[in-house]
Image: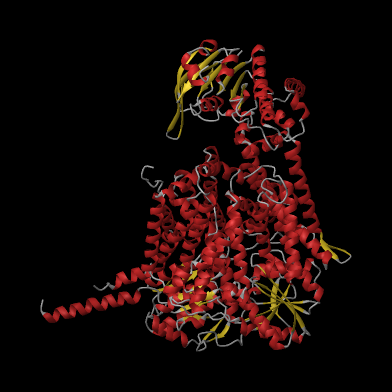
Amino acid sequence: MTIPPWLDDFLWTYGNLVHALGVNGLLALSMYVVLAVGQLSLGQAAFMGLGAYSSVLMTQQLGLPFWAVLPLSVLAPVVFALVIGLPTLRLSGVYLAIATIGLGEVLRAVYLNVDLFGGALGLSGIPERADNTMIYGLLLAAILALWLVGRSGIGRAMEAMREDETAAAVMGVNLLRYKMGALVASAALAGLAGCLNAHVSSFIGPGEYGFEPAVTILSYALLGGIGTPIASVVGAFILTLLPELLRELSDLRLVLNGVIIVVAVLFLPGGVLPFRLRRRAA
Amino acid sequence: MLAQQLVNGVLLGATYALFALGFTLMFGVLKVINLTYGFYFSAGALVALWLVRTLGFGIWTALPVAAMAAGLIAVVVDWLLLTRLRSAKAPELASLMVTLGAVLALYSALTAWLGSDIRRLPPDVISGEALQIGSVRVTLAQLLILGAVAILIAALIWLLRGTKLGLAIRAMADRPDAAELMGINTLRAAAIVSFISGCLAGAGGVLIGLQRNAIQPYMGEEMMLRGFVVIIVGGLGDIRGAVIAGMLLGLLEVMTAGYVSSNLKEAVAFLVLVVVLWTRPSGLFGRAMTRRA
Amino acid sequence: MNRRHFVAAMAGVMALAGAARAQEPVQLGSIEILSGPNAAYGVAIKAGLELALDEVNAKGVLGGRKINLIVEDSAANKDQAINAARKLIGRDKVVAIIGPTLSNEMFAVGPVANERKIPILGTSTTANGITAMGDYVFRTSLPESDVIPVTLKKAMDRGVKTIALMYANDDAFSKSGYDVMKSAAEKAGLKIVDIESFGSKDSDFSAQLTKIKQLKPDAVGISALVEPVSGVLLAARQLGFGPETLFIGGNGSNSPKLGEIAGKAADGLLVGSPWFVGKPTAVNTKFVADFQKKYSKEPDQFAAQAYDAMKIMAAAIDRAGAAEPAMVRDALMQTKFEGVMGPFSFTTGRDPASAEGVVVLVMQNGKFGIAP
Amino acid sequence: MSGLRIEGLVVAYGRTVAVKGIDLVVEPGQVVTLIGANGAGKTTVMRAVSGLIRAKSGRVIFDGVDIAGRRAHAIAALGLRQVPEGRQVFADLTVADNLALGAYTLSDRAELARRRDAVLTRFPRLRERLTQLAGSMSGGEQQMLAFGRALMGAPRLLLMDEPSMGLAPLFVEEIFNAIADLRREGITILLVEQNASAALDVADYAYVLETGHIVLQGEASVLANDPAVTAAYLGGH
């Protein structure tokens, strides 16, 4: 079967958007994982940056093939998560959020000041190695895995932590282990997203992984709702499509984008998909 | 050079402290992560600019008017967006999210309306004269701003420690339900706190805009990250803590740029933040006015 | 109806359709930053493009066809810039693209246009390596490496022997400007006494300037956009830098905003530029007057570069003989143009060929004039 | 003299109905106690009366006025004061500030001083600790402070929610002595307690709440000897 030219054009026009939907879906899941244990960590953009930078260096400097680069791209973010995890996860609420933002800013300074990372010029000329099959394959796999975890006993413990940490600890949930597990999973997902994004868009720069993207990733999960992994992905889809759908409004579109977020939070407090995972009776 | 650098640090620190005053009050008392705070800072500066340039106000009459305008915007935003969430005892994520949307909408509307160009107050609104004391130079404008900051800090501490309203605000920060049982109208008190915070933000915007000779819609947004550092290191809701943390941060940045490397100037703030949080999670200066967050 | 009539009728219909198509506007795209903190640049560029477009469309191209310019917002975001480029190419079927605003965005968008063989013409992208991305990537903005040596030479004529450098280390434009400034200073034999950086959103420069002041260099070179440059100059005067220190700006300083924001503090600053508002050529005086009339403010260099770029693009489309991207690309290569910036043609590497239009300007009472 | 009359009160948290339509009367000058197991809905009743949560339906009549749906600060201003569950003193404020907040709606300074003196006479321990932060005191002292703070509002009806919870026996005794004193002084009190025997000792009338319903009511002395109550709440004495 051959693709008719108009369809080919259509797919090409929205090709980057289609990539972005998948990548942002992965980022939303990376946020979902930590929110699911009641943690407000905003380190996802930093993890994404580590995944992106390390994978591009592997491609460009070491000449590794992409089948090796993609799995290895989780390495740097996961190691970083393990190192910062212990002292950082003792914090809660706002403090944790701000600490993770601070770590992201420190990383940004590293990208800017170390020549290997290209400084302000970033890294360009990245070959297009990722494609939709990889992106959506990983997204589906991640949704499936998180869904299965959510339905298991681990999921119950996670929900207990989200509702009331002290009570969960009394019930015998090892809080630190779960938090650490969630942080590492989150880092791995964000790292993969960073690697995929870098290998479809030919350029990465130090400004892409700071405060603003961190908050945007959070808003994906919050808009969708954190009851199920799929809800956060839906949130990412909506917020990624919105600026493109509103393109005709030119400079007022960000105003409307903001208003839509406000209205959604005020009137859909559980997110767009406020359902919960149904578990087998305990 | 050391003397001048110390003065530079204090002046920079004063701007951080000024920004953080209302921020720590809003955050510490109202218990929401309100990302719109920086917008009131910008709004104050822009209103003052309009008053001075279009209506011919003097800067010292424009300052309180602009501050109050920013305060009113803060009350309206808080009332429209956060009252419901607060009375529903919604999790802090919701307030973070709703103010995030509001920030996006507000700044975009402001730039769509005014453009994102930098503007400045007419150069003659404040004297550009400088004092030379030994090897140290300070401009008159900088000294005036330092004075204004000191007055605002003193006024805020007096309000919180020396008045009945301040007592009610501190009670509300501690236990909102119990405060309500004492007959304190916490909705009204929250509006007052929003107003005061907004006024402080607006005044900060005018003064800092004046000192830097640059006013543009995103100026508040650019202060936010450092604002977070200051109020967290100082302890949420702790006025004196915020002032000390602001000063220390200013000095640290200047000393880093002056004696280590200017490449590290920005990163040092966040490094300090992370280290403080790792070692003293409730801020550097003992108990905050409000415990926990 | 017999067969011959049918053929004739069909031919007539097709001719009519062809004529109708001939009158269809030529689709031209542009990607600029129109929202968010950096919108000022995109807005200036859009103004320059649209002013030139009015003139172009008064005559039309390819025998009277109008150019339909579609300006898309990138919000200074990489993904949105790419989406905009793909929308322009895939849906609007543009024959070429002007923009995007920032070098970083061009690094992301250039390969997209190049892949589809759509010429893309940067008007404000000065970073190194832009045109190396592919055969379809052009720029009209003079790279700093052509401008800075001219400025430094002027400074050395005035007896400058030592220099301190300052730059914004977090945006590509300022960083590559600094790289050029540093190597040009070394090549010219200037002694670099200190190098200081700051963030492009910073507004406190006192620590860096205090340090520089103590080292007493003859000159301070600044590579940054106009906002931080203004801040640096204001802070320098507050710290007591006098006329004995010569301030030298990069491309970013060449904006009427500098005088508006920094006022007298900017007096004496030297900047090299292919263009300035008072450039005494007929075409420039007309441009400045028309711009003033349409937007009631002075154009800056971003608007001027955009104005020329639109005319260069329109001329290339006209020369190409058809609204075909590959033909427009080839026609662009043949450009010989006399614009507000001066005489213009492309090198084989699709960069501006000549820096002969570069003049060194000096700031005096908030306005740029030719440096004596 | 002010009384309280609750009619058909229903309170829900989301979809969970915690109080399922109760009727309850506190006559002026009476001490009435509401006893029941943990989770029976006692605290919910208290919070609904004082306005901290909004009732889904039903009437709360204080002094002849329906106050259901009014906000807590307005209800407090009417002279209906609460000693909340878990004390809820302002931990970061001094004892003196806590007491001052109890009379927040009062602006007469002489009256304020008079009330403060009365409270400090009733609880002499507080006088020693006036400048101390409330959060640094022991649980029993904090309970006295919460009690004293409510009295600063010169209550016409006092709601007390689990005043003995988590206290050492010595303090429990002191608290109940104070309640008995107040009763003699003619203050109307609605007392919620898990310590049913002490509550029934001090009360005139009692209600028993189980899973959101009133299941039993009567004179406190009668209920104290009711076999069902004895078995369920008085540890089978």
D223, C326: nearer the viewer: D223
Q: How many marks?
A: 0
Which color scheme did the rendering employ for the protein? secondary structure
The reply to whether residue D26 is in sight is no
At 57% from the left and 22% from the top, the residue drawn is: D195
Tell me: residue A119, above or below residue D225: below
Tell me: residue B172, above or below residue C228: above
Find the residue positioned furthest to the left: C2
D109, C17: nearer the viewer: D109
Residue C328, image x, y percentages = 42, 82
- Specify the quadrant of the image occupied by residue C316: bottom left
C326, B180: nearer the viewer: B180
Find the residue positioned furthest to the right: B134
At 39% from the left and 84% from the top, the residue drawn is: C327
Residue A217, image x, y percentages = 49, 57
Tell me: residue C115, above or below residue A103: below
Find the residue positioned furthest to the front: D237
Residue B227, image x, y percentages = 66, 54
Quarter containing the C terminus of chain A: top left
Q: Is residue A226 left or right of residue C200?
A: left
A160, B195: nearer the viewer: A160
The reply to whether residue B63 is in sight is yes
Residue D188, image x, y percentages = 61, 15
Quarter containing the N terminus of chain A: bottom left
Tell me: residue C93, above or below residue D35: below
